[in-house]
Image (cartoon, rainbow, N blue to C red):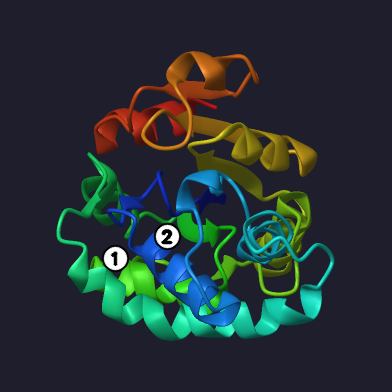
Amino acid sequence: MKVLLWDIDGTLLNTDRAGVCAWMEAAEEIHGGPLDASRLTLAGMTDPLIAEITIDDLMERPGEYEIAPRLLARYLELLPDWLPRRGNGFVHRNVLDTLEALAPATDFEHALLTGNLEDGARQKLAHYGILDFFDWGAFADGLPLRRDIARRARSEAESRHGENVELYVIGDTPRDIDCGKAVGARTIAVATGGATFDELVEHDPWWALDHLPAAAEFAARLREG
């Protein structure tokens, strides 16, 4: 079995910064005033780590991580309102065709490996109509480090399919490549989000792409191994 572990933001879809807007509204409510969103780097980061960075750097309240659960909870409350308000979001090129084409295949399984909290991940995927393609996932709940999320994903995949399961991590940042390599997965890097093609190539993924190819080409390359 080939388990395809998909990242969400920048890989499957682009929310037109709905997540950033929800995040900044939550942070400014808790902070009690405006904050500079341009100082926040999100690509490849996990939600719990973004919370810590927000507290340390944007709120300038270093180490006051007791705020983090309230910040994360408020973000999840605001996200459903922001997703439809940001009208230029989209599912990336060839993603839907690939999900549809491989869903019936007996040698492929779609799953998630994401820095999103589970609730936020499900909200985003549901809004763009692709949630039902994924039976399971590894999320950032309780895990600020992406490598730990990848280890959770490997453990779940092995419990479902045995130790010989083949893992493919599909993402758009060097952090996706790193976490995939950390668990022995083949890494597929697409330059559709957080990094350029050249930046991704520097991290030596198994396959680097400007964008996801057509479903037939994608499946054929994975079956060739």
SS label for mark 2:
helix
Tell me the tag on residue 64: none
Between circles 1 and 2, the one closer to the viewer is: 2
- Where residue 185 appears, as percent x and y from the top left, is 68, 39
Distance between the alpha carbons at the discs numbered 1 and 2: 21 Å
Mark 1 or mark 2, which has the lower sequence index? 2
The front one of 200 and 137 is 200
Residue drawn at point x = 42 percent, y = 75 percent: 122
Q: Nearer the viewer, residue 168 or 89?
A: 89
Is any atom of residue 132 visible in this view?
Answer: no
From the viewer's side, name the closer residue of 164 and 131: 131
Three-letter amino acid code at the position of disc 2 = Val
Amino acid type at circle 1 is Ile
* Residue 136 visible in the picture: yes
- Label 1 secondary element: loop
Residue 160 sits in which quadrant?
Answer: bottom right
Q: Residue furthest left?
A: 87
Say above or below: 70 vs 22: below
Q: Is residue 203 above or below residue 89?
A: above
Residue 140 horizontal/vertical position (percent) = 65, 66
Residue at 48 percent of width and 25 percent of height: 224
Q: Which residue is mark 1?
A: 130
Using a 10 Å C-alpha cutoff, classify the residue at mark 1 as few (fewer than 14 neighbours), some (14 to 19) or many (20 or more).
some
User: What residue is drawn where x is 43% and y is 73%?
Assistant: 25
- Badge 2: residue crowd in 10 Å (few <14, some 14–19, many ≥20): some
Q: Which residue is mark 2?
A: 20
Q: Is residue 45 above or below residue 81?
A: above
In this view, which residue lies farthest toward the front?
33
Judge by depth and name the residue closer to the eye, 210 or 49: 49
Q: What x and y, as percent, mark residue 148? A: 78, 57
